[in-house]
Amino acid sequence: MSKLMAPGGTMQMAYSVLEEGADAVYVGVLGWSRRGSDVELKDEEIKDLVAFAETKGKEVRVVLNTMPSSMEVPLLLKKVDRYIGWGVSGFMISDVGCMVQVRKHFPEIAIHVSVGTGLTNAEDVKYYKDMGATYVILPYRMWLDDVKAIKRTIDVGLEIFLFRTDTQGGIICPGKCTMSSYFRFKRWVDDEGKDYFYGSANRGGDCLRICQIGWEVATDGQPLSKRAILKGNPRLWFHELTDYIKAGVEYFKVPGRDRSDVLVRDIVRFYRKVVDEIRASQDRFSPEKYLPELEELKKRWATERNRRDDRLVARAKA
Amino acid sequence: MFELATHVPNLKKLKEYDLSAYDALYLGDFTCPLYPGNFGSTIEALREGVRAVKAMGKKCYLSLYAIPKDSDLPWIKVLVEESGDLPLDGIEVHSMGLLRIVREMRDDIPIHIGVFGNLYTDETARVLKGYGVERVFSNAELSLEEILYIKDHTPIQVILPLHGKIPLVISATCFLTEYTKTAPAHCEEGCAQGHWLTHEDWQMKNIGRANLSGKDLCLLEYLDLLIRQGLDTFYIHTLGEDPHYVKTVGGIYREALQRAMAVEEFCTPHWLAELQSLAPLGLCNGYSFGMSGQDYISRELELQGTRS
């Protein structure tokens, strides 16, 4: 049975997505989840959320998907142990070594392989399965055919983003990009010993959205006429959801930890409705009636994304 | 003794370049399988390339495409299979899937992890060792302290880039083709031109399927420290550079490394000036000292407690 996984960028967001019908909520740990501290949760908050989710019969997934320093690995394992003690049943992880250690120490726990690994093919998925993955989160460049091929040959759970790009163009992100930290990179260490690596999403802080700035292009000193954006922005989708459900995808992931609580709540409400109707109507599902609502959500999504990008780029330039 | 290595994409470049400064060559352009005559996509070219490199008395590694899709895996497997009778000293991969494939097909050859292989921790290095990995190129974002930690706490060899434009991001499609809406008639020439991306005072270089740092990583001033830490395997980034760059930078570092090992003066103002003249956007230290990749700390200023 496919589940709907939704973001908890704030406690309010986490509570509201569970109330709106998400089966699971994913939350980032301060300094450890590829986002800024403003959309990550403190440990006490995670503890409270786990207790709340338990009363609702829902899951909490904890995001520890930064690439840590070697020296930070013991701290990551200590935190995993702590969260499991509170009832957390699964984690998003990128670093292979950490994945192997978590699997070794906690054989029963669910490990979701993060897109931070930068995987690009089914053999990569096999490798992460060998490393102890329970689920592999596919990048939004891998589509239905990829899902079917993986499901045919590999016994591993899959998690799919409910946003994607329509083309294969643009840079590979995340997992193969350090442009942001090349230009801006600040480091500070918290009381527990975690380095925040601000400016590097790979390592802990935010990606400062360098790819979304208009870049002037010149060839051997001769300027070309237009400005380039280096990466397309993914958009919400649902057209082939029926096929993805049939293909056996275990988790559909609503993005948006750094969007507003209200927008994320509305997106979850929308997808809950759609997924439930697909299940009820099976092959008779007709997406047309949902299109206006999806378009409205896409607009709100784009508006908030642009606002966020402007904010992050301003930080990069500060 | 030390090893100084770089990448060479195809036979044409292998013939054009003066590679006398280098001990080892990675054959192939890992960013673009369509690069004309890419050693990493063309067995005939690879055969000839390996023969030529061995005739030079150098070590020779095959460098495979960094971000293969499923549709790329069959031709890469054929290449790995057909390269079985070549005297390669190693195969470089950046993808964990390819690592798995190469290990299954060739358990007789050392595997190297390339710069896009996402190596950040000693734990991961140990796991990779179990897959036959002998050498790792750690992620560009690691500081020297972190790189040394991996070297000192694992049975794996670390290769350290000393100079050149840092690969910052890779793309599955060609930026130049997308941007101009036409595929270059001659890819090699298109890529050889300097394509610069500029935003205010920020700059990068594009080579088609990858963006490189605008500034050149430069660790010339720090060679004695690196050697004292036990590092002995070094690398120069030369993707997208011309023959003069490949020869000059390699030559400077070869001699500087020899001098540093002999505890002689290794960082002459002349060499530093020459490296600066080859870097129109200036020099940087990459992430070596825990700062933004584009920053540069002069050794002299650092000793005075000042950062430039």
Image (cartoon, coloured by chain):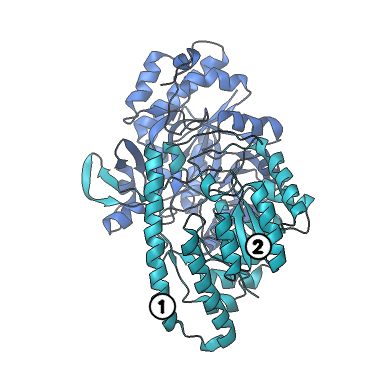
Chain colours: A cyan, B blue
Residue at (49, 50) in percent of width and height: B40
Which residue in the structure is indicated by mark 2?
A135
Q: Residue furthest bottom?
A: A284
Q: Is residue A30 left or right of residue B66?
A: right
For this rendering, which residue is in front, A31 or A183? A31
Q: Is residue B156 visible?
A: yes
- Tag 1: Cα neighbours inside 10 Å, few (<14), some, or many (≥20)? few
Q: Disc 2 or 1, which lies upstream in sequence?
A: 2
Q: Amino acid at mark 1?
A: Leu
| Rendered position, A291 above or below B253 | below
x then y, percent, for residue B10: 42, 45
Q: Label for residue A291?
A: 1
Image quarter of the N terminus of chain A: bottom right
**x then y, percent, for residue B264:** 52, 10
Question: Which residue occupies the foreground of this view, A271 or B162?
Answer: A271
Question: The residue marked by circle 1 belongs to what chain?
Answer: A
Pointer 2 with pointer 1, Cβ within 8 A: no
Identify residue type, mark 2. Answer: Tyr
Q: Is residue A84 left or right of residue B53?
A: right
In the foreground, B4 or A257: A257
